[in-house]
Image (tube, rainbow, N blue to C red):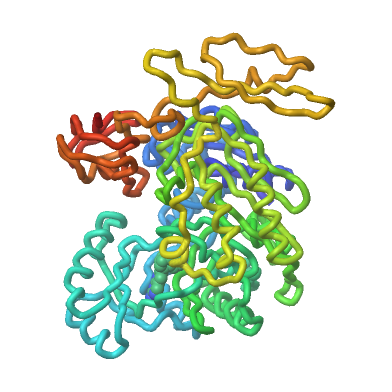
């Protein structure tokens, strides 16, 4: 086994890996950016090395800085987590050349799967079919026309070196081919630096089912059940579950064997995931993710296995501990991603900031994999996953009820989270009846009723000139029954002393004044909640706007975010134009 493992990552996944190493008695090394100097993964690791920098490119993606930390720490293995260097064959090679083990697949397998056409060819070598489509780059629109004549529409045009849905365009008819090719190439170039594209038949209502596979360095493979990740929005998964509900056992076994065949065909080792689309009883290979995935704990809860332990053992040259027949699935697991995003009105605006309060649920069948504690800050520079709640139940209904129970116990303040949207999904009859597909959240689920909530009570509207008020609660007993009484007091008022050391009042967090968070009436100053670039301005001076109307579009954290008016009125000033860079809290539009 390794004598020291460096974790080239941050947040919850770094914490997850540190914990697994500790249980195996392996010392751990954390790395950190300037913003993460005091982060949880740094606090938990045995040693930590500064990378410098703030952005991912300056820190967690800085090859030189990480290689330097590996050398200085004397680590003999590196776990890349997910994202960052996890699917970077050059990085895997660079550390291997230095005699350090990459805890992941061989670089050649990463390369085969990084190119979606070679991935399709590898699957075909293993006898596994992808969605009907081409295995050559599109060089001319006439190829798409010919494909449409043979297979019909819609057609998906995809980035050959892409993934995660970026660069994918759906072509509804022949007339749309030229513009779809053009925008697929443009997006692909922008995201991946390359513009090769190919095509497939587009399936309109598939479920996303993925198989967890494992290979060791002795040619052994197993699949560890499957996960259903159909509850997603704009290619961001919200909820994952294992096993996939309603999947016939014969299909499940065939998919598992197909995933193993794909892994074998590219000489895969360590943990990987084969993604399939499942529609009308048929499944098609989509792509293989050559890393440990965010949703791996759902598989852990139903198989009873520790996948990170498996990764470490396999990377160290050990044989897989179980044969396929020895892998069993018990009950049902649901994983909910809790992101610092505000789902109000279904918009999912990033909501970075300090976490002022964090109380995570517990109890039977409840697991929390988090990257933060109260007092830590979610930075706009990184992924805004706060953590994952994973609940196990003896069947799917029990798991759903338990997850809803746990989500309702969750206490977090300072940032808005996706929890209200998660509850809406889990409580929806379509979800319990397994009538959802990958399109369901966007087309069917109604999130318009969800209000902004940063876990801090909003102060009631105040008269002009009056000091802002804050909510304080006191616990009182009336006839021997305990009540919690809320009072609205001026911010400057002394904290009421509560008998029995009732610290609740003293600890009551202050409402945040910026953005769409607390203040009752809504400000006429429309501010952006994070740093980014203005890509569109939709109003001009003198326009009459309604509360909630989008006034401009901000590109930040790789997403376009609609910035909305908080109150109705007339636009008095527009302070930005497309292309402008803005910082968190900058006022972009003034409404009177
Ligand atoms: C597709 C598809 C339908 N037909 N390919 C999106 C992400 C990338 N991994 C592949 N994706 C899709 N490819 C064909 N031929 C539908 C999707 C898709 C999707 C897939 C998995 C999970 C969520 C999704 C959401 C929208 C579209």
Q: Position of 23 compared to 444: left or right?
A: right
Q: Could you say which quadrant of the image residue 312 lies in? A: bottom right
Q: Nearer the viewer, residue 154 or 329?
A: 154
Q: Position of 417 compared to 149: left or right?
A: right
Q: Position of residue 2 (x, y in %)?
A: 66, 48
Q: Position of 136 compared to 106: left or right?
A: left
Q: Position of 427 compared to 157: left or right?
A: right
Q: Name the residue located 45 percent from the left edge and 13 percent from the top edge.
A: 467
Q: Position of residue 80 (x, y in %)?
A: 52, 49
- Residue 392 visible, this orientation: yes
Q: Name the residue located 67 percent from the left edge and 42 percent from the top edge.
A: 409
Q: Is residue 551 above or below residue 168?
A: above
Q: Name the residue located 46 percent from the left edge and 51 percent from the top edge.
A: 83
Q: Name the residue located 64 percent from the left edge and 54 percent from the top edge.
A: 308
- Residue 8 visible, this orientation: no
Q: Is residue 547 above or below residue 228?
A: above
Q: Position of residue 100 (x, y in %)?
A: 54, 49
Q: Nearer the viewer, residue 308 or 404?
A: 404
Q: Quadrant of the C terminus?
A: top left
List the single residue furthest toward the right.
480
Q: Position of residue 188 (x, y in %)?
A: 28, 61
Q: Determine the quadrant in which ligand 1 lies.
A: bottom left
């Amino acid at each position: 086994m390794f004598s020291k493992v460096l974790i080239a990552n941050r947040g919850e996944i770094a914490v997850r890996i540190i914990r697994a190493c500790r249980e195996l008695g392996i010392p751990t090394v954390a790395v950190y950016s300037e913003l993460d100097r005091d982060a949880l993964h740094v606090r938990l690791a045995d040693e930590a090395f500064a990378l410098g920098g703030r952005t991912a490119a300056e820190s967690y993606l800085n090859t030189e800085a990480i290689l330097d930390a590996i050398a200085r720490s004397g680590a003999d293995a590196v776990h890349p987590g997910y994202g960052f260097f996890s699917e970077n064959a050059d990085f895997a090679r660079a550390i291997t050349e230095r005699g350090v083990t990459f805890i992941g697949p061989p670089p050649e397998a990463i390369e085969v799967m990084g190119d979606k056409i070679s991935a399709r060819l590898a699957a075909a070598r293993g006898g596994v079919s992808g969605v009907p489509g081409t295995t050559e780059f599109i060089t001319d629109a006439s190829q798409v026309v010919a494909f449409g004549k043979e297979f019909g529409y819609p057609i998906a045009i995809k980035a050959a070196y892409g993934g995660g849905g970026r660069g994918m365009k759906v072509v509804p008819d022949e007339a749309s081919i030229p513009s779809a090719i053009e925008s697929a190439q443009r997006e692909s170039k922008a995201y991946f630096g390359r513009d090769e594209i190919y095509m497939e038949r587009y399936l309109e209502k598939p479920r996303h089912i993925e198989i967890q596979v494992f290979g060791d360095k002795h040619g052994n493979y197993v699949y560890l059940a499957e996960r259903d990740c159909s509850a997603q929005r704009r290619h961001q998964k919200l909820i994952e579950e294992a096993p996939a509900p309603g999947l016939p056992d014969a299909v499940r076994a065939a998919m598992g064997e197909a995933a193993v065949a794909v892994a074998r065909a590219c000489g895969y080792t360590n943990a990987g995931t084969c993604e399939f689309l499942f529609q009308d009883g048929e499944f098609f290979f989509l792509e293989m993710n050559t890393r440990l995935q965010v949703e791996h704990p759902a598989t852990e809860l139903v198989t009873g296995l520790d996948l990170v332990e498996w990764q470490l053992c396999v990377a160290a040259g050990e044989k897989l501990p179980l044969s396929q027949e020895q892998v069993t699935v018990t009950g049902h697991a649901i994983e909910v991603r809790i992101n610092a995003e505000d789902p109000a009105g279904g918009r999912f605006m990033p909501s970075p900031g300090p976490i002022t309060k964090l109380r995570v649920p517990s109890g039977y069948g409840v697991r929390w994999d988090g990257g933060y504690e109260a007092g830590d800050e979610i930075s706009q520079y990184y992924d805004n996953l706060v953590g994952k709640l994973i609940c196990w139940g003896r069947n799917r209904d029990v798991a759903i009820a338990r997850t809803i129970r746990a989500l309702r116990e969750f206490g977090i303040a300072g940032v808005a989270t996706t929890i209200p949207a998660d509850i809406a999904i889990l409580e929806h009859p379509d979800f319990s009846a397994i009538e959802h597909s990958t399109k369901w959240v966007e087309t069917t689920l109604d999130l318009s009723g969800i209000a902004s909530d940063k876990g801090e009570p909003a102060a009631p509207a105040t008269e002009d000139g009056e000091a802002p008020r804050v909510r304080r609660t006191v616990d009182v007993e009336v006839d021997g029954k305990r009540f919690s009484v809320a009072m609205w007091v001026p911010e400057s008022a002394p904290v009421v002393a509560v008998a029995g050391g009732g610290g609740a009042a003293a600890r009551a967090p202050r409402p945040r004044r910026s953005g769409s968070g607390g203040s009752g009436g809504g400000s006429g100053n429309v501010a952006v909640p994070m740093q980014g670039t203005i890509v569109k301005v939709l109003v001009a001076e003198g326009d009459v706007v309604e509360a909630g109307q989008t006034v401009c579009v901000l590109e930040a954290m790789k997403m376009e975010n609609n910035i909305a008016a908080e109150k109705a009125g007339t636009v008095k000033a527009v302070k930005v134009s497309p292309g402008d860079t803005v910082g968190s809290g900058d006022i972009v539009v003034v409404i009177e």
